């Protein structure tokens, strides 16, 4: 018996929307495992979008790079909690495990219909112009454009964000480090663009934020980040996913939301990692209209 080849139906907007949403959810769940990196994916995605726009890329390219910026750390799903959440500096052996995350990210996405859109950002964002990066040690022009942009934005956010063993750097110090390493660790054009935007104040609405107009907060008890979501209001409860202490969302002077401890431990269900669905819907809606999707999925 001969079987007629099945025709692959053309991609629909609804199907594409669902596929992109699953990618954002996957990345969000991975990030939620680490109490110190709240908002990192959103910030890298937004920095990458702005840099790509300033470089004069097409709307399709900008949308793809923004998506890649949010998904770049997907492979950290394969990093054990004791390494991902370690409060001190990593040993050489632990750092070697961290360095596997670009390849793990590609393995996680293997077979996904939209892998081609984000493979460069996920797999090569730690490659460098001088060839000293990982996982392949690519040099200069061999590093894909998406990875060059996401890579410098990732490094900038890592430098300016708090970690268990150090405070985040001031803006100018981070920009100076990037400036000193242009063409070595960071792509020259992407670095120059980020530096210009940083010194002009264009990155300020993103630095130290987890969403548009929502600043990042630290746990008053132990230090890691507490993320306030766009659907939360004064009087709502949140918690630190590291120590489990409950906080109440309050309205601070100037109309910004803050947090104060309630003196209680949050329910276990509140501490469990989850995805910010409202943020994800907004992010998907922002990119899907511009992405150049495959004709069939």
Image (cartoon, rainbow, N blue to C red):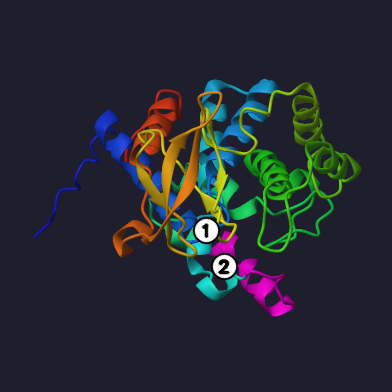
| Image location (x, y in percent) of residue 115 | 45, 48
In reply to whether residue 99 is colored magenta, the answer given is yes
Q: Is residue 26 visible?
A: yes
In the depicted view, which residue is nearer to us: 272 or 47? 272
Q: Residue at the far left: name it.
A: 1
**SS state under label 2:** loop
| Image location (x, y in percent) of residue 4 | 15, 48
1 or 2: tag closer to the N-terminus = 1
Give left or right: position of 193 versus 183: left
Residue on which the image places disc 1: 35
Above or below 261: residue 197: above
Quarter of the image with the C terminus is top left
Q: Which range is magenta?
A: 87-104
Assess disc 1: are there few (<14), some (14-19) or many (≥20) residues with their C-alpha within 10 Å of its C-alpha: many
Give left or right: position of 293 versus 142: left
Q: Is residue 113 visible?
A: no
Q: Are marks 1 and 2 in contact (CB under 8 Å)?
A: yes
- Residue 233 is marked as none
Q: Residue at x 23, y 36 (%)?
A: 9
In reply to whether residue 45 is colored magenta, the answer given is no
Q: Residue at x 39, y 49 (%)?
A: 238
Q: CA distance from mark 1 to mark 2?
A: 7 Å
Quarter of the image with the N terminus is bottom left
In the depicted view, which residue is nearer to us: 112 or 177? 177
């Amino acid at each position: 018996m001969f079987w007629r080849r099945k025709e692959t139906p053309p991609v629909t907007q609804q199907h594409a929307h669902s596929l992109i949403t699953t990618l954002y959810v996957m990345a969000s769940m991975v990030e939620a495992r680490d109490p110190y990196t709240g908002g990192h994916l959103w910030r890298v995605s937004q920095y990458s979008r702005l840099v790509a726009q300033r470089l004069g890329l097409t709307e399709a390219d900008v949308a793809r790079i923004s998506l890649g910026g949010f998904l770049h750390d997907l492979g950290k799903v394969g990093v054990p909690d004791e390494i991902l959440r370690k409060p001190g500096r990593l040993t050489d052996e632990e750092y070697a495990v961290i360095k596997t995350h670009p390849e793990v990210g590609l393995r996680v996405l293997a077979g996904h219909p939209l892998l081609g859109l984000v493979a460069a950002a996920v797999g090569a964002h730690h490659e460098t112009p001088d060839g000293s990066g990982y996982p392949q040690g690519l040099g200069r022009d061999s590093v894909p454009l998406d990875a060059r942009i996401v890579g410098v934005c990732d490094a900038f956010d890592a430098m300016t964000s708090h970690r268990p063993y150090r405070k985040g750097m001031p803006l100018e110090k981070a920009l100076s480090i990037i400036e000193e390493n242009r063409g070595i660790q960071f792509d020259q054009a992407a670095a120059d663009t980020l530096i210009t935007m940083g010194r002009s104040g264009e990155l300020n609405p993103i630095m130290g934020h987890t969403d548009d107009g929502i600043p990042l907060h630290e746990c008053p008890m132990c230090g890691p980040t507490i993320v306030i979501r766009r659907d939360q209001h004064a009087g709502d409860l949140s918690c630190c996913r590291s120590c489990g202490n409950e906080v109440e969302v309050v309205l601070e002077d100037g109309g910004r939301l803050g947090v104060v401890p309630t003196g209680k431990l949050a329910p276990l269900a509140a501490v469990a990692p989850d995805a910010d669905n409202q943020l994800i819907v907004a992010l998907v809606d922002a990119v899907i209209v511009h992405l150049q999707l495959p004709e069939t999925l």
